[in-house]
Amino acid sequence: MGCVMSQAEKEAMQRSIAIDRTLASENAYRAKEVKLLLLGAGESGKSTFVKQMKIIHEDGFNRDECKQYRPVVYSNTIQSLAAIIRGMDLLGINFASSARREDAMLLFEVTTRHIDTEPFTPSLLDAMKRLWGDPGVQLCFKRSNEYQLNDSARYYLDSLNRIGDRRYVPTEQDILRTRVKSTGIVEFEFDYRKIHFRVVDVGGQRSERKKWIHCFEDVTAILFFVALSAYDLGLREDGAVNRMDEALRLFNSILNNKWFLDTSVILFLNKKDLFIDKIREKPLTECFSDYIGRNTYQDGVNFIRDKFVRLNKNPGRKTVYTHVTCATDTNNIQLVFQSVTDIIISDNLRDAGLF
């Protein structure tokens, strides 16, 4: 008698064939390049994410590379303190001690002579420590939403002794917190899970956005960055424009752009560490007059997430994936990127009708 397959055996074989096709398709897909386009307004964390990719997927920064960041750290530290002192004039805040005026003059002499990228002299270091300890400077720092100040200001100024040491070499955390205005297009490539990733970072300032269209071809996924903590801040380019409002407008234009109708969009609600501290002191109503929730981290994040997700005009065709992140936390970004990779693979298999 011939061998006749049972119904159960037939179903098992069909499942096996389907799995083989899925694996074959996935392997074929993995052989392709994945292009990730990083978008978002200025100072939202895109460049920090690229540095994290180097730390996670390559060997990080060697000692010589770390040393190359010393001028940036020196400048970021000096310029942050100078910005606070200029903010004191703007807000009408005085030093607690009049002796600090001489310290401020020494600081501004350094910035005027454009030598802020050099190691601190002993006299400059002492002056900066006295300034940072002045109650008037601390009061102005607490009102930093009323002028422009880098997010890393406290981190560096709290580390003056370490940064001012003549043997100082920046740590990876120091490097992650450096701030340099992104101009042009920066690309970083690496392999992960047998996939070749090409990460494209473009400047987020308004003057840089005209360059974005040159990067729109062959995009696998958009990673859009939003600074959660920016809800009470004005743009560096135009202080009258709220940064969160700008991010919403920008996300709307990207999410519903004809170029990206079939492109995966992953929303990074970044700087959660700063948001946790800020939401306790400053209500979300400073940006969103319609907010009626509690001033808690979870309520605030849920509200902001919904604001962005609701901008999707094609929810039946496109899903907005969201992650709440801290771009300076390597472990957090490593876990999130694993999830991002899963999303990209799943979306492409689904598009092929195999998932």
Image (spheres, rainbow, N blue to C red):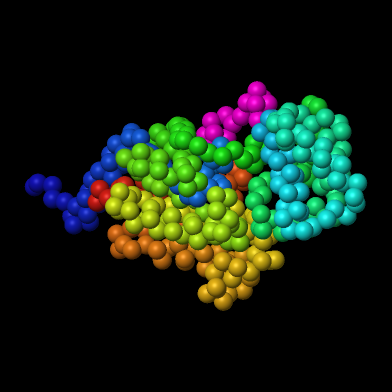
Name the residue nearer the viewer: 122 or 274: 122
Name the residue nearer the viewer: 104 or 286: 104
Name the residue nearer the viewer: 261 or 331: 261
Residue 251 horizontal/vertical position (percent): 43, 56
From the viewer's perspective, is residue 330 above or below residue 253? Answer: above
> In which image quadrant can residue 74 be found?
top right
Residue 120 horizontal/vertical position (percent): 79, 31
Write the residue at 56% across / 59% down.
240
Residue 274 horizontal/vertical position (percent): 65, 55
Asked if residue 350 shows in the view, the reply is no
In the displayed structure image, the side of residue 1 where residue 296 appears, left or right = right
Write the residue at 56% across / 66% down.
287
The total of numbered circles placed on residues is 0
Write the residue at 76% across / 34% down.
110
Asked if residue 121 shows in the view, the reply is yes
In the displayed structure image, the side of residue 335 where residue 209 appears, left or right = left
Residue 195 horizontal/vertical position (percent): 39, 36
Query: Which residue appears farthest toward the bottom when viewing the image?
Result: 292
Residue 68 included in the magenta stretch of the image: yes
In the displayed structure image, the side of residue 135 where residue 197 appears, left or right = left
- Residue extent of the magenta highlight: 53-69
Write the residue at 38% across / 53% down.
254
> In which image quadrant can residue 63 be found?
top right
Query: Which residue appears farthest toward the left when viewing the image?
Result: 1
From the viewer's perspective, is residue 25 above or below residue 311? Answer: above
Residue 329 included in the magenta stretch of the image: no
Name the residue nearer the viewer: 207 or 4: 207
Q: Main secondary structure of the magenta part?
A: helix
